[in-house]
Image: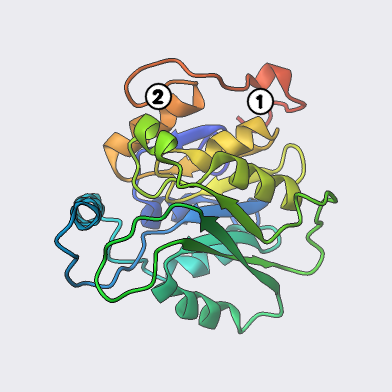
Amino acid sequence: MLGKYKLNNIYNEDSYKAIKDIPDDSVDCIYTDVPYLYVSGGVSESEFGDRFAKKRKILKEKNIYNGLDFTILNEFERIMKKTNIFIWCSRLQLLEVMNYYNKFDYNWELLTWNKLNPQPGTNNTWLSDIEYCLYFRKKGVKLNDGYKLKSKWYTSPINKKDKDLFNHPTIKPLDLVKRHLEHTTQPNDIVADFFVGSGTTCVAAKESGRRYIGFEIDHEYYKIAKDRTNGITANGQTSMFTDFNKLNIDTKKDM
């Protein structure tokens, strides 16, 4: 248990409130894709511009467009045993996250997902072909060996297949999230995600033999994430997933 919450579960709750009930020094790693802050403005009159406008509309409707209340970073620091955190954020949020963590003597890295086929067509801007993840760890957090695990960048096409399967506009590649967790956490560690979206963090933790807990305020995404950890896609189809019984993990521990 983490306070009143069972591990290896996802909860349909407001993270800003739920995190208050997580005990101090109880989580080994936080891995989260926070609500992004986007520049407002027009898009080009084209097929690609129409797609971007549609994505922006979805982000607004799901309240994942106007950024993060950065006071939650204080709670993140409180609940971690030793600071070990991944924060995916938009370019506009990088400086604010960095400014918060500059007061600590932590190791840090800027990690990227480089997309081979980003959508073109927006007016007077660079391509949106890079997504950014800031990683911070306190001295003493162990990093596991492995050449592939240590890479700070990841290159792939945009993962339209996953977006179609799990109906989330900012879904991250499962293989990349697993790589990050397998580099920075140990079997049976507790991984928390407070903006769980379609559940990628929880699935990655499960398939890597880590325990997890997730929170998602949007009911539609919460249900998708819950189903996904049980191998079910957003349209109700069964997909391949790893059974806990096949992993070196005690699923009853701290339940």
Mark 2 crowdedness (10 Å alpha carbons): few <14, some 14-19, many ≥20: many
Q: Position of residue 154 (x, y in %)?
A: 62, 54
Residue 100 pos. (x, y %): 53, 79
Q: Residue at x 18, y 53 (%)?
A: 50
Q: Quadrant of residue 98?
A: bottom right
Identify the mark at residue 203; answer none if there is no mark: none
User: From where the camera sits, is residue 206 visible?
Assistant: yes
Task: Work out which quarter of the rendered image holds the N terminus and state it.
Answer: top right
Question: Relative to residue 126, is residue 34 depicted above or below?
Answer: above
* Image quadrant in which the C terminus is located: top right
Residue found at x 43% / y 35%: 162
* Residue farthest along the left direction in this orientation: 45
Residue at image x 49%, y 21%? Answer: 231
Residue tagged 1: 251
Image side of residue 152 versus residue 150, left or right: left
- Nearer to me, 137 or 236: 236
User: Depth check: 177 or 21 in front?
Assistant: 177
Relative to 99, is 150 above or below? above
Q: Of circles 1 and 2, which is in front?
A: 2
- Tell me the kind of residue under disc 2: Thr
> Horizontal and vertical percent for residue 6?
53, 34
The amino acid marked with disc number 1 is: Thr
Q: Which mark is residue 233?
A: 2
Q: Is residue 105 left or right of residue 174?
A: right
| Observer-nearest of 33 and 193 | 33
Vertical placement of 140 versus 199: above or below? below
Residue 149, image x and y in percent? 75, 50
Is there CB contact under 8 Å for labels 1 and 2? no
**How far apart in space, not on screen, are marks 1 and 2 (Cα)?**
23 Å
- Asked if residue 1 can be seen in this view, the reply is no
Identity of the residue drawn at 53% across and 61% down: 87
Helix or strand or loop: what does disc 2 sit on? loop
